Structure formats: C-alpha cells, structure tokens
C-alpha cells in the first residue's frame, strides 16, 4: 500500500468548508485504491495570524516540509477585517508569497477547461466556444513584480511614491519555459508565448531565452503574442490556444480572465510545482461574504485534489475519476449558485451535497 502525507491548509473564508469536501473525496479515493492518505491540518492565512501572530507560522512550515504534498484553501478577509492586520503581516504578503518562495513553486498550472456540453456556463457565445475550451495556462510563480524590491516613500517635494521592481534571472526564465515547452509536447505541440516586449525589457530577455532553447523542441510550434492581444483573443477566439506561458503578473491576470470565460473562478483548480514539492489550490478568493453559508462551489478545490493525485502521486485514473464525477454532476443539471443560468433548468445543490455526490460517485466507480 502506498502512503502519502498531505498538509491541509484550510485558510480563511470559504476555505475550511471546501477543504472538508476535499477530505471526503480523498477518503473516497482510499476506498477504491491501494492507498492511504495521512492528513495533517495546519494554520495558514488570517486565521493563523489571529491565533499565532503569523500568517505562515513555523509549525505550518514544518508540517509542509514533512508532507509529500500540500493542499491549500483560500486566504484573505473582507476589507474591514483586513484592516485589523498590519499591512506587512496580511495573508497574501506574509503567508502566500513566503510559502511559494520557501517551496520554490515556480511553475503554476491553471487549466481553463469547459467541455462543449457545459458551454451554457460561459458568458461567451456558443459559436465562439465551439467544441469547448481546453487551455493550460502556465505561469511563472516566484519572480517578477510580486517578489521584487518594494518601497514606499516621500520625495523631496513631499510627494508620496511607490517603487516596485520587476526582476527575472536567466535561470528563472529558462526553467519555466522548459516546463511550458515540455507540456506543449505532451498536448498539441503549440505554445503561445505571452509577453510585453514592446515595453518591458524583462520580456525582451524572456523572448531571447526562448529563442535560444526553442531549437531543442522542434516538435513545438511557438506563437508569440503581446499580453493585451492575448486578453482580447481569450474572449474572441479561445480555441486557438492550447498551452500559454507567461510571467507572474500576466499569468495572475490572464488566468483569472480564463475563469471569467468559463463562467466562474469556481471552475479553476491549480497546481503550483517546485523542484521538490508542490502545493495545490483553487484559483479563486476566500469569498468572505458567503463563508459559512454552504453555498460555495467546491469544484476548484476538488479539481486541485485531482491535480495533486496526478502530478504528485502519479494516480492518473483516480484524478480522472474526480473530474469525470464533477462533470457528470453538471451534465445531470446540478449546479452551485455561482453557475446558475436563468435560461437553463438548475438543480441547486449545496457545498456539502456537491462533495457528497462526488465522493459517492468515486466510491462506486
């Protein structure tokens, strides 16, 4: 029997309730596989700060280091509650970014997937969606503006100013490009390189390095596209994309736009891969306005579980079973509040019901 240690960082807002659904599904996977998951919860985010004074406590770091993979929920509070935490100690700045840096999870995979049978979820016209949307956005996750030097100050004229540095090394760029090229090889052999080289020197270097290593991947056709054009074409012609690669902030923005063309960020799981370990998380926020109401869509969290099973543990069949079970629920007409369509008959289910149905389907498969 294979045994895996998983750290559970439930986080804030709807994080704990969607994490509960992840636990249900992992237990269901155990019933159909020769595997045992040792689940260890750990404090993270605002919940951790209010209890320990740190958004990423040392105990949580230790639990992550001792685990085979990490499953992370959502973090952050509403505006009013956020003000109770010092700026430099807030969850995104003092929890999430340090976690990424500690684990060096430089490769972020965000699938933008909507089969033709579920095209009614998307705000795009059916003729634009065509046979469905299937894009893998690969985002560099530990460089760029988010990790560069930051400074607030007042100049000699009494004007407040801010400075943020966008910095990348050759090694950082090359390793994420190789991940994207290798992913493209396994899919359709097309890679869209998203950049802003008409303005940013970092993009000039990015493109230079891609040109230097592209010859090692002769079976991959590379398409270069400015980031603003890519944002437009994601809405006008998403079918042209298969694998897209980009730097950190561009990836943050365009992957959220990817959730928009699907109809909800509730349909966006993700994997954050480092050289030694990975963590998995829904791409959406903590939604404090609906926390505790049992109405959150757990698809992104359960999809992240599925990605963990495949990417960290090599359990491809079990991963597919989770995605198949969730897609089947939608095909049967079940939906969560974020995906309600006025013109479609909706069979609304709660967060718990969604998790129960997926777990039941997996146990029976």
Image (tube, rainbow, N blue to C red):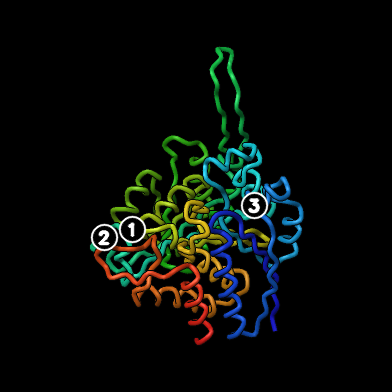
Q: Quadrant of residue 179?
A: bottom right
Image spot of residue 199 (x, y percent): 44, 35
| Circle 1/circle 2 CB separation < 8 Å | yes
Image spot of residue 300 (x, y percent): 49, 63
Secondary structure under tag 3 reads: helix
The residue depicted at 58 percent of the width and 54 percent of the height is 12
Image spot of residue 97 (x, y percent): 62, 47
Secondary structure under tag 2 reads: helix
The residue singled out by tag 1 in the image is 238
Q: Earlier in the sequence, mark 1 or mark 2?
A: 2
Q: Quadrant of residue 198?
A: top left
Q: Is residue 179 visible?
A: no
The residue depicted at 35 percent of the width and 77 percent of the height is 332
The residue singled out by tag 3 in the image is 47
Per the model, the C-alpha gap separating discs 1 and 2 is: 8 Å
From the viewer's perspective, tell me whether residue 153 is left or right of residue 229. Answer: right
From the viewer's perspective, tell me whether residue 233 is left or right of residue 109. Answer: left
Are there few (<14), some (14-19), or many (20+) residues within 10 Å of tag 1? many
When the figure is inspected, residue 243 is found, relative to residue 150, above or below; the finding is below
Mark 3 vs mark 1, foreground winner is: 3
The residue depicted at 58 percent of the width and 85 percent of the height is 32
Query: Is 252 in front, or is 193?
Result: 252
Per the model, the C-alpha gap separating discs 3 and 1 is: 38 Å
Are there few (<14), some (14-19), or many (20+) residues within 10 Å of tag 2? some
Q: Earlier in the sequence, mark 3 or mark 1?
A: 3
The residue singled out by tag 2 in the image is 128
């Amino acid at each position: 029997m294979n045994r895996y240690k998983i750290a559970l960082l439930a986080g804030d807002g709807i994080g704990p309730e969607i994490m509960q659904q992840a636990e249900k599904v992992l237990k269901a996977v155990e019933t159909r596989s020769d595997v045992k998951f040792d689940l260890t919860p750990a404090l993270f985010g605002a919940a951790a700060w209010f209890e320990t004074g740190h958004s990423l406590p040392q105990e949580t770091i230790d639990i992550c280091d001792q685990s085979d993979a990490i499953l992370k929920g959502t973090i952050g509070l509403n505006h009013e509650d956020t003000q109770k935490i010092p700026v430099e100690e807030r969850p995104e700045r003092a929890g999430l970014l340090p976690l990424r840096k500690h684990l060096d999870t430089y490769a972020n995979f965000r699938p933008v997937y909507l089969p033709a049978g579920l095209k009614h979820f998307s705000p795009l016209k059916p003729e634009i969606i065509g046979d469905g949307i299937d894009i893998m956005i690969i985002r560099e996750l530990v460089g760029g503006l988010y990790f560069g030097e930051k400074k607030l100050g007042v100049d000699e004229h009494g004007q407040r100013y801010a400075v943020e540095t966008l910095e990348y090394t050759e090694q950082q760029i090359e390793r994420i490009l190789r991940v994207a090229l290798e992913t493209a090889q396994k899919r359709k052999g097309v890679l869209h390189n998203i950049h802003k080289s008409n303005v940013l020197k970092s993009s000039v270097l990015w493109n230079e390095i891609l040109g230097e290593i592209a010859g090692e991947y002769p079976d991959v056709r590379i398409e270069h596209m400015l980031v603003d054009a890519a944002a437009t074409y994601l809405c006008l012609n998403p079918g042209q994309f298969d694998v897209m690669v980009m730097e950190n902030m561009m990836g943050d923005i365009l992957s959220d736009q990817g959730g928009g063309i699907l109809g909800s960020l509730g349909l966006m799981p993700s994997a954050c891969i480092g050289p030694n370990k990975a963590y998995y998380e829904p791409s959406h926020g903590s939604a404090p306005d609906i926390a505790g109401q049992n109405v959150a869509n757990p698809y992104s969290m359960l999809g992240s579980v599925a990605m963990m099973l495949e990417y960290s543990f090599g359990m491809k069949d079990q991963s597919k079973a989770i995605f198949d079970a969730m897609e089947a629920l939608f095909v049967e007409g079940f939906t969560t509040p974020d995906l309600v369509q006025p013109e479609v008959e909706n069979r609304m289910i709660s967060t718990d019901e969604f998790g129960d149905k997926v777990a039941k389907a997996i146990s029976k498969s």
